[in-house]
Image (spheres, helix red, strand yellow):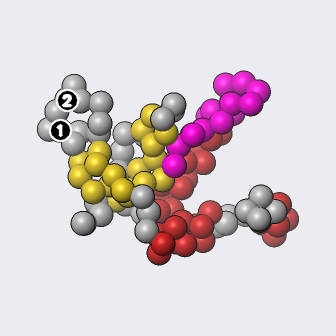
Amino acid sequence: MKTLGYTTIGSVRGCCDHIHRSLGTALACLKKDGLSASYQGTGCYSDREVLAVTHDRRNSHPLEKIKFDTRELNETERRDLSSCFYVGLDEEEREGLSSFQG
């Protein structure tokens, strides 16, 4: 199945409503949503995750809530996403985050 790009979707926060061309830009969107959620109060967080888009439905049914057909990331995409995650972080920030990953 052809991948059109990537989007971020959560059951509570919903979809970002656009298709990112790369995993890196999808991750940036995910981080931005996390920051936005944290401003809403103590304990608030984003439940969104990055998914691959396989079909764009935005123009086919304007009243339909499902905007995209998606699939879980494959192993290569997950590896690429995790490598994008550390871009722009200094060594101390990387070490702090790696402790959460087990």
Tell me the residue at 67%/66% (across/down).
86
Residue beneath disc 1: 59
Cα separation, mark 1 vs mark 2, equals 6 Å
The 10 Å Cα crowd at callout 2, few under 14, some 14 to 19, many 20 or more, is few
Mark 1, secondary structure of its residue: loop
Amino acid at pointer 1? Asn
Main secondary structure of the magenta stretch = loop
Place of residue 13 in the rendered image (x, y in percent of width and height, measured from the top left): 51, 32
Amino acid at pointer 2? Pro
| Residue 53 part of the magenta segment | no
Q: Is residue 94 above or below residue 42?
A: below
Q: Nearer the viewer, residue 91 or 51?
A: 51
Q: Is residue 24 left or right of residue 52?
A: right
Mark 2, secondary structure of its residue: loop
Please state, as top left, top right, bottom left or bottom right, where the C terminus lies in the image: bottom right
Task: Answer whether residue 95 is visible to the viewer in this image.
Answer: yes
Residue beneath disc 2: 62
Place of residue 61 in the rendered image (x, y in percent of width and height, measured from the top left): 16, 33
**Quarter location, residue 4:** bottom left
Tell me the residue at 81%/62% (across/down).
99
